[in-house]
Amino acid sequence: MPFAGMMAGGAAAYLTLTLVMTYGVHRVPRRPVHEPPDWGRVTDARIPAADGGSLEVWRVEPEGPSRGTVLLAHGWSRNRDRMVGRARLFGSLGYTTLIHSARDHGGSSPYRFMNAFRFAEDIESVMARAGGPVLLYGHSAGAAGAVIAAHRNPRAVRMLFLEGCYARTRKALVSLYGQHIPVLGKVLAPGIVAWMHLFYLGGMDRVDPVRLAPDLDLPVLLIQGERDAAFTVDCARDLRDAFPAGRAELFVAPGSDHSSSSLTPEYPVAARAFLGRHDPQETEERGKR
């Protein structure tokens, strides 16, 4: 076979394989966990989703007066239970917490092609029933969705907590797939992400968190694992610096990876200090103690 023919055949095989894998990465096995809330007054509800489906949502009210509402969004392949540990800290401080499963995750309705846009829609569906502005907490894909939702609904969000959030979508996905696809990940990842960029008509770049951040004039806490190999500390610094000057703070959890930065003993201290600086009620309560 002539060299040109071999090259054309190889290119065709690469494009076909990466196209098939583009579908596959949207359908990767889900990894739900089971950890229901163990504090406060828990209401388990279903609410309408943007496409006519439904979302499972926990609303957990504190025993005493509520200081406000925190909405927590999980990351890719997880479910609402994954955010219970993160919500527990806010519950202990007297906040109402709203914890949902995105579509195609947990017990929420199916959706064939979930992405950051759809995560944002699900956040907005819950936010519309929060009864007022929220403190919005997202992890990974949920953090990217939180940035999009806050950008589209600036009056509905009081502050942002972004754990393991990427700065640039395509760069992050190439890094992520390059690490997690067996054997040929680094070779196949660019092709998969190129197909996704084509499939979404270039929309991935338009909602890069680093592009939206300059418009978000609100307090932001970035929560980053020191050893997060996919979305690195340098990426977190780039995202922090994209927000209006002085509005974003970066907490780097020593020794932690992508999913464990909020589990370190240093994180609750950092979160409480952040709330103390930016939540008027928390500041007032600290003054009384």
Image (cartoon, grey):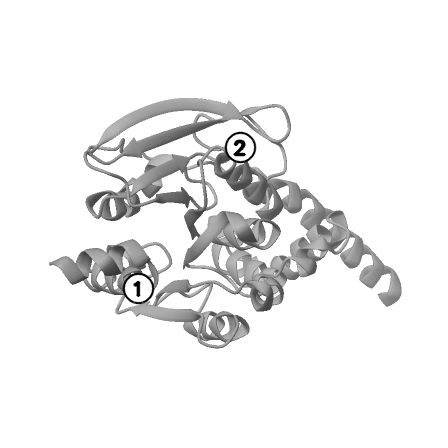
Viewer-nearest of discs 2 and 1: 1
Which of the two labelled residues, at mark 2 and mark 1, occupies the earlier sequence position? 2
- Residue 32 appears in the rendering: no
Reading the image, the residue beneath label 1 is 274
Q: Tell me whether circle 2 and circle 1 mark residues in contact (CB < 8 Å).
A: no
User: Residue sitting at 60 percent across and 65 percent down?
Assistant: 215
- Residue 146 seen in render: yes
Look at label 2 and name its amino acid: Arg
Of residues 155 and 106, the one drawn nearer to the viewer in this rendering:
155
Name the residue rendered at 60%, 60% in the picture: 169
Q: Position of residue 38 (x, y in %)?
A: 20, 32
Q: Is residue 185 left or right of residue 247?
A: right
Q: Residues within 10 Å of mark 2 (few under 14, many from 20)?
A: many
> At x 34% / y 41%, what residue is drawn?
82
Q: Looking at the rendering, which quadrant does residue 197 occupy? A: bottom right
Looking at the rendered structure, the secondary structure element under dot 1 is helix
Image quarter of residue 72:
top left
Q: Quadrant of residue 111?
A: top right
Query: Residue under circle 2?
Result: 103
Q: Considering depth in this image, is 79 or 178 the residue closer to the camera? A: 79
Mark 1, residues whose alpha carbon is within 10 Å: few (<14), some, or many (≥20)? some
The percent coordinates of residue 288 (x first, y second) are 14, 58
166 lies above or below 94:
below
